[in-house]
Amino acid sequence: MQNLKLFLSVLLINLVIIGCTKPVPEDINQKTGNVIFLHPDGSGLTTWHANRILNYGPDGESNWDRMPHTGLYRSHILNSLTTSSNAGATIHAYGVKADYGAFGLINGKEITAASGKNRSIMQEAMDAGMKTGLINSGNIIEPGTAVFVSSREKRSMYEDIAKDVAQSGVDVILSGGEEWLLPEGVEGRYGLGKRTDGLNLISWLQDNGYTIVYTKDELSQVPQSTEKLFGVFAENHTFNAKEEEILVEKNLPLYWDYSPSLDQMMEKTIEILSYGDKKFFLVVEEEATDNFANNNNAAGVMEAVKRSDLSIGVVQKFMKKNPNTLLIVAADSEAGGLDMIGNDYIDYKDGDLTPENDRNGAPVDGQFGAVSKPYFSKPDRNGNILPFHFVWNSYDDCYGAVIVKAEGLNEEMVSGSFDNTKIYRAMYKTLFGINIR
């Protein structure tokens, strides 16, 4: 018995020594949880101010306003101050600076992420057995979501990118872009396919266990227990990103009414991903905030940011019962350089129209484009309804005043002057419990 006790004591000491010398991740005991990254592309500070003023009043609060932590986003990349959508997405997905043409590759080469692995953060999450989701109000090939599962030499490799996303294994994928899912000439729900390789990705998805839906009504009927869901809601985007005057001329809506809104897609996806006891990682893009702004369509931007804010509300409701969740909201640049003017010398009377241009020649937008009815705020705390109009400084993406917002688990990581590579770090710590320097 004495010899047995001695043996066990020596064995225990050796195990302790071995345990003490074994490398341990810095934050092995760090609490982990779900991550939802919402990317209202092209949105800047004015976009969010305008959403509050139009829908809640100057003294009100939007869902975005109520998010507790704020950072000032630094958007420079390897070779320019202003990023591209694909470079910004690459930085978010890998946590390292990328060049302007990057699409999950840098100079055509595989990226070593900030974690030290040659995988995007979503691919690492999938490797770890987490549930995953991608939502885009735009085409399936849009980089804000696609880069998380696709690495290609050029952004214009649409067929390859669509294939990468569709065959990625992500649990829930919702977007537009039917055109890149079907062979050339094959009639789909919304139009003809454009693929030149003969591959029918809709058929492939069905054969691999995905439930396919095409409309907001079909999406609403999907059971929570669904394991694999693929939604395609338009031939191209779920919106029509053209100038206001062109939309009126062609009788086109801002968004197709058969397509679900971003908040509807978000609500159903969270319902499915949260079913069971696995963590999940969801990347969401409202593409219209960018595309409408690049066409200087203020009405479109305001509808798109409203949908983004409603999506934040969906997550906030979920987080009340699931606090082990991080919500991050950020763009990567400010599209069009949108701003507002509501000076005391702007005194619109009934029937007054906005000017075509500002005094420096910058184009002005009212509710229906140039030379149209001005915008009016919801009442302020004194009951005043204040008039204003929008002014644009470009058609391009600008460095701008991009804001990062965070709420939930590890929200404190978002503060101060916030480099674009830190989006990845906050998400990584929350998903994996590892603090990357």
Image (cartoon, grey):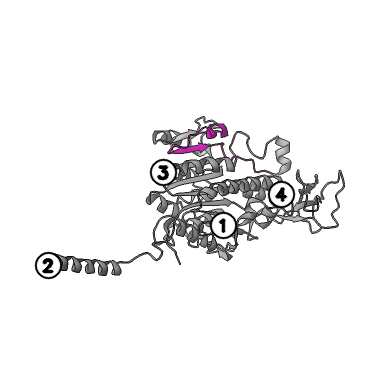
Mark 4 and mark 2: span between their CA atoms? 78 Å
Q: Which residue is mark 3?
A: 169
Determine crowd level at label 3: few under 14, some 14-19, many 20+ residues with C-alpha closer than 10 A.
some
Amino acid type, label 4: Tyr
Q: Residues within 10 Å of mark 1 (few under 14, many from 20)?
A: many
Disc 2 marks which residue?
3
Quadrant in which the C terminus is drawn:
bottom left
CA–CA distance in space, label 1 to label 2: 59 Å
Left or right of 107 in this view: 291: right
Q: Residue at x 39, y 59 (%)?
A: 117
Mark 2 belongs to which amino acid?
A: Asn
Instruction: Give the magenta-colored segment's residue range.
Output: 215-242
Q: Which mark is residue 56?
A: 4
Q: Are marks 3 and 4 in contact (CB under 8 Å)?
A: no
> Which tag is nearer the camera, tag 1 or tag 2?
2
First of labels 4, 2 by sequence position: 2
Residue 189 location in percent, x, y?
Answer: 54, 30
For mark 1, give the secondary structure: strand
Q: Nearer the viewer, mark 1 or mark 3?
A: 1
> Which percent across, then down, holds residue 183?
47, 34
Q: Is residue 312 left or right of residue 158?
A: right
Q: Nearer the viewer, residue 390 or 124?
A: 124
